[in-house]
Amino acid sequence: MQQPIVFSLLLLVASVAFAITVRKLAAAVMRGKVNDLKLTDRIPQRIASVILYFLLQRKVAEPVSYNTPSGITSKHHLLIFWGFMIITVGTIEFMVNGLIPSFSFRAIGLGPIATGLYWMVDLFNLIVLCMLGYALFRRVVLKPRLIPMSLDAGLILLQIGLLMVSHFLMHGGEIGAAPQLSYGPVSDAIGLSLSSLPASTLHTIATVGYWTHAFILLFFLNYLPHSKHIHILGSLPNIYLRNLDQRGVMPKLNLDDDNDWGVSKIEQFSWKSLLDQYACTECARCSNFCPAYNTDKPLSPMHLIHDLKDEMAARQKAFLAKAAQPKTDGAEAKAGEDEKAGDELPPLIGGRIKEETLWACTTCGACQEVCPVFIDHPLKIQQMKTSLVLNGEGIPVELQRTFQNLERRGNPWGAADDRMAWAEDLAFKVPTVGDEQGSEPEYLLFVGCAAAFDDRIKKSMRALVEVLHAAQVRFAVLGEKESCSGDPARRAGHEMIFQEQAQANVEAMNEAKVRKVITSCPHCFHTIKNEYPQFGGNYEVLHHSQVIARLIADGKLTLDDKMDKRVTYHDSCYLGRWNGVYEAPREILSAVSKGEIVELPRRKQHGFCCGAGGGRMWQEEKGPRVNRNRTQEIIDSGAEVAAVACPFCTIMITDGVKDAGVEEKVQVLDIAEVVRKSLKNIESKKAAAETPPA
């Protein structure tokens, strides 16, 4: 009778301690702001997410870095996880047996099923133990980047290893004393090897194995919330509650409320954003795929999440300490105490989170794309940048000039020229909304600042309108009524300028009764498509690559002279990763090229950023340049033409080609320019199409 009593006491103490810890963790999360995302809708889809990404570990099976496409380094964790899931069957029997010694799968009449369960659990104990050995070897010998051997990691591996070993000792001792029992091939083999020992020794081995297993199991339960393995608790709810809507959309701020000016304290994040920190698996994928980290910038998305988790713990500790203080008659209201709790700690930004860390982000979304538990790193960074800018703290000098240009000139270049100068040398007049030619267009062509004011991008826009003109697409532009889409302002943290520009454009577009929009800039595409609805601007938005691909497929563009050069395509982050447009540009290249089309090693969802997003276009870059890193990959591919579908990418890759001194070998062309080069008799064909038959 002593065993169930002692086990019950251990289980009670461990369970109470665990419940108290989880309650504190939950309290820290719920101190965050109410989340404005729809997190409890689409239940079947959320359950499917848990099955796919938690139970089946789909993202864990993906590459852990650009340099590790596959292999045991990314998949040993799968065997450990699935092994634990199966071993849990044996743990259930062990726990019930601890309370009711007569209980076992055999005792309740499962017969052959029980034998099958025992063998399966036994085999996976061995598999997990082997994978732990590899995990130790990996950390100590292979030493993958960002995954060091630490005391915490060592303790985790030790505890899991002891669980496996104690399982074998416990059952091995039992089988040695009673050879008719069977708990699986490993335990049976151990029991057979021990069978010659005295019964008392076998009893001692089984007892030591039993209590070691019990103690480690209950200790491990309580160690988890305080270790890197807290993700075992946080990952499942984080996957279930993940954002199922469009990614990369920043919430609209209430600028009349100065408490809604971004995030400067940990409590200003939403509770779902705080839950992210508990879900982090420390797999380092986010940092391994981050272009800033890969070019030696002071940003590691994984360490950013660690720092936020540490900040949560520190603020929660200060909050609990404040709450434990005796209240006096003159004490402030509880809300006021909550507000002041932790104010003696260093500020979040400038403290644990350095300003240069935030400004290094290109908002490319690579970190979020590869995260196995759907942590939203970019949004956190953007919200903290917004707080810096709106509160006038630590804004880089280059961005101060950019903001002035946006406010005074309506574009980040600060150009004073009119927005239609780019169209002056065309053979036809570009229709403007409101004039005779631009009445009732099918599409509004949103030109964008780069195409209006950058000499290089003007060529791309002229090529695009010539292609649309040749295909007889009815389009018009806003002309002088168009303002910057607001992406540079919002992604650089100036929500106030963004809202002014977005509202002005929406008013102009709604006045023109716009229903469909074409953009050549993925940043404008993303903003108008996904963020203008916040201001009443609901349109069908298409990127010019989607429109051109459709025109070619429908036979509305006849290609006269296909390109006979080795060509590659550079994926734009805002077009591809954020909005899933990967195939349209490739379909165009397949249609216009008779030369070889090569894919870059880093492509599609794992494409490498050009380095211009997040306001980086207008900031100086210290250390190795992101665009040079990407350009070198293009050069190494042997491509003669680097096709792009983004003005920012065109500028950055062109600069990279110039820096590398290979301008004569590698030509950087927008998708529209590639198509335009294949339309040799564009004007004569247009004239013929307009001439009525005799």
Image (cartoon, grey):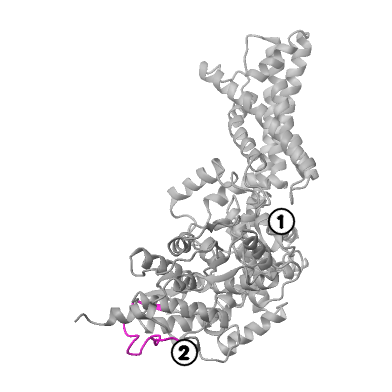
**Mark 1 residue crowding within 10 angstroms, few (<14) / some (14–19) / many (20+):** some
In this picture, residue 15 sits left or right of residue 153: left
Q: Who's the residue at 52% across and 62% down the image?
A: 576
Q: Which residue is mark 2?
A: 424
Above or below, comparing residue 667 to residue 100 in the picture: below
State the CA–CA distance, disc 2 to disc 1.
Answer: 54 Å
Q: Amino acid at mark 1?
A: His
How far across and how far down the image is residue 573, in percent?
Answer: 56, 64
Mark drawn on residue 306 = 1
- Above or below, 312 relative to 101: below
Which region is colored magenta?
A: 425-444
Q: Is residue 274 above or below residue 534?
A: above
Relative side of 652 to 552, left or right = right
Residue 150 visible in the displayed image = yes
* Mark 2 neighbour density, 10 Å: few (under 14) some (14–19) many (20 or more): few
Which amino acid is tagged 2?
Glu
Q: Nearer the viewer, residue 515 or 625?
A: 625
1 or 108: nearer the viewer: 108
> In screen coordinates, is 166 left or right of 433?
right
